[in-house]
Image: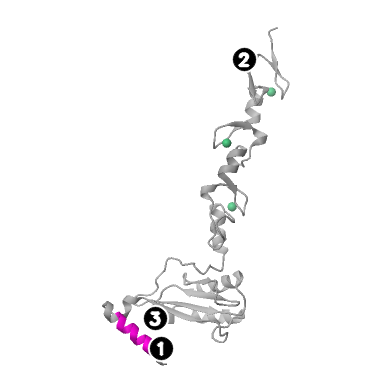
Amino acid sequence: MLESVTCTLCGEELPPADGVIFDGRQLCRSCYEDHTVICDRCGERIWTDDDCGDENHTLCHDCMDRYYDHCADCGQLVPLEDLRYLPDEDEGDNGYCESCYNRLLQEQGVRSYCYKPEPIFYGSGNRYLGVELEIDGAGESDSNARIIRGVGNQAHEHIYVKHDGSLDDGLEIVSHPMTLAYHMSEMPWKEIVNKARQLGYTSHQAGTCGLHVHVNRSSLGDTYRQQDNTIARILFLVETF
Ligand SMILES: [Zn+2]
Ligand SMILES: [Zn+2]
Ligand SMILES: [Zn+2]
């Protein structure tokens, strides 16, 4: 009988030409197919047991370390360039896969102080007012922020709720720009304020809170000069009274 070799995994004897040497070991063709895989990233063949990937990826240890990380929420492997970071968490903290990121963003009730979404304009006219109402005394809590947002955003996305450094224990409710008519008749301010009060917040009485109203400059006059005149009159009224 011709010379034969033995597969070190299954013990089968086979002609040398039918065997494969991998990682210094003699294997038969089928053990080779069954027990080794190819890294998706670098193309190197590795033992299946050394695969650092998951059900969607085959990765050697090096490529896993260098190019991937686990989603901080669901644990799924994500290429580093696709990891997403929440606005309130520092880069380098927790990276998330796309779907966890979107879900967490939704759940994140309190927005950071710097949060500024694309404005949505409500009502029609040329003067839009955006309101920032600070409330204090019952916590900067995500669940309260969610509750208040829920009340304000039943019909449309009217408000968001932010962190405010000037408050001891509170939140800032911010409206998208709306016409005065919209604020008065469509906007559920009464429900928002009642809910905040029910949760234990105060605003005017807290002594720490401000109420700011933003208005578009273009609604204060046709020319820059007219706009400045209007602003001067507003300042005069505020400072005098
Ligand atoms: Zn074998
Ligand atoms: Zn690799
Ligand atoms: Zn995830």
Span highlighted in magenta in the image: 227-239
Which residue is denoted by mark 2 in the rendering?
A: 17
The residues bearing labels 1 and 2 have C-alpha atoms spaced at a distance of 95 Å
Magenta span main SS: helix
Earlier residue among tags 2 and 3: 2
The residues bearing labels 3 and 1 have C-alpha atoms spaced at a distance of 23 Å
Which residue is denoted by mark 3 in the rendering?
A: 181
Which residue is denoted by mark 1 in the rendering?
A: 238
Callout 3: SS = helix
138 sits to left or right of 121: right
Q: Is residue 183 magenta?
A: no
Res. 57 visible in picture? no
210 sits to left or right of 9: left
Q: Where does residue 45 sit, x and y in percent of width and height?
A: 59, 30
Foreground residue, 18 or 71?
Answer: 71
Earlier residue among tags 1 and 2: 2
**Residue 89 higher or lower than 206, as above or below:** above
In the current view of this chain or complex, which residue is farthest to the top? 1
**Quadrant position of the C terminus in the picture:** bottom left
Callout 1: SS = helix
Q: Nearer the viewer, mark 1 or mark 2?
A: 1
Earlier residue among tags 3 and 1: 3
The residues bearing labels 2 and 3 have C-alpha atoms spaced at a distance of 87 Å
